[in-house]
Image: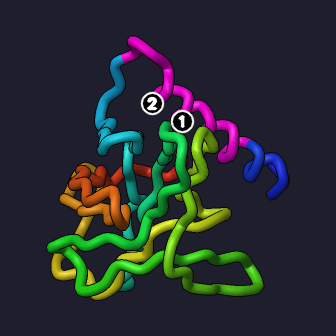
C-alpha cells in the first residue's frame, strides 16, 4: 500500500513531466495551448461524483519575462468557476494564481486548481467541454477539458 507522501510525490512528478512536454522545443503534445508567452498543457478533470461540482487540473508555464496571472475562468457547463486550494484540514478561495516567468505551475489536487460548481449537465469519463481561461492583461484562452480517470495522472 502506498503512503500519502508517496502518492503526493508521484502526482507532483507526473505534473512536472507534463510541464516538461509543453516547454520541450520541437515536441508535439496533444491538447496543448499557447497564448503569447503563456503555455498551457493538457487540461483534465476526474469524473464527478454524485455532486454538482468538479475540479479541473493541468500545467501552465509563463515563458515570458514578466509576471502574469490566471485570474479566473468560465465555461458553458457550470454556473461558476473559482480558484480553490483544499487540504484535508482547510479549503480556501483565491482571486488569482501568480505565474512567475519560467516557473511551472500545476493546477493540481494538492495545490490550487479550478473548481466548477452548478454543473449544467452530467459529465462522465470520455466527455469533454470548453473552458475559457482568463489571464488578465494577457487575454483569454479557450481550452478543451477532458474527463479522465484520476489514476492516469
Q: Is residue 102 left or right of residue 120?
A: right
Viewer-closest of 84 and 8: 84
Which quadrant holds residue 102?
top right
User: What secondary structure do most residues of the magenta stretch adopt?
Assistant: helix
**Residue 15 visible to an observer of this rendering:** no
Viewer-closest of 129 and 38: 38
Which quadrant holds residue 92?
bottom right
Which residue lies at the image location 32% right of the left edge and 54% below the top edge? 147
- Give the percent coordinates (x, y) of residue 51: 38, 84
Mark 1 element type: helix
Which residue lies at the image location 48% right of the left edge and 75% below the top edge? 83
Span of residues in magenta: 10-27
Which residue lies at the image location 77% right of the left edge and 45% below the top edge? 9
Which residue lies at the image location 71% right of the left edge and 86% below the top edge? 90
Name the residue carrying label 1: 19
Q: Is residue 42 left or right of residue 113?
A: left
- Give the percent coordinates (x, y) of residue 41: 41, 40
- In the rendered structure, does residue 21 fall within the stretch colored magenta? yes
Viewer-closest of 32 and 119: 32
Image mark count: 2
- Give the percent coordinates (x, y) of residue 59: 49, 46
Q: Label 1: few (<14), some or many (≥20) within 10 Å?
A: many
The CA distance from mark 2 to mark 1 is 5 Å
**Residue 38 visible to an observer of this rendering:** yes
Q: Is residue 62 above or below residue 80?
A: above
Q: Is residue 86 above or below residue 47?
A: below
Disc 2 to disc 1: CB gap under 8 Å: yes
Furthest-front residue in view? 66
Disc assigned to residue 22: 2
Mark 2 element type: helix
Furthest-top residue in view? 26
Amino acid at each position: 500500500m502506498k503512503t500519502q507522501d508517496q502518492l503526493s510525490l508521484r502526482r507532483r512528478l507526473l505534473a512536472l513531466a507534463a510541464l516538461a512536454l509543453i516547454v520541450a522545443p520541437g515536441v508535439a503534445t496533444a491538447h496543448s495551448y499557447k497564448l503569447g508567452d503563456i503555455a498551457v498543457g493538457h487540461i483534465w478533470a476526474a469524473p464527478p461524483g454524485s455532486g454538482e461540482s468538479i475540479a479541473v487540473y493541468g500545467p501552465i508555464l509563463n515563458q515570458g519575462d514578466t509576471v502574469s496571472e490566471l485570474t479566473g475562468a468560465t465555461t458553458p457547463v457550470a454556473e461558476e468557476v473559482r480558484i480553490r486550494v483544499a487540504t484535508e484540514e482547510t479549503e480556501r478561495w483565491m482571486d488569482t494564481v501568480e505565474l512567475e516567468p519560467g516557473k511551472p505551475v500545476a493546477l493540481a489536487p494538492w495545490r490550487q486548481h479550478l473548481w466548477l460548481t452548478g454543473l449544467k449537465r452530467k459529465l462522465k469519463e470520455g466527455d469533454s467541454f470548453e473552458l475559457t481561461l482568463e489571464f488578465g492583461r494577457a487575454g483569454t484562452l479557450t481550452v478543451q477539458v477532458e474527463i479522465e480517470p484520476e489514476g492516469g495522472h
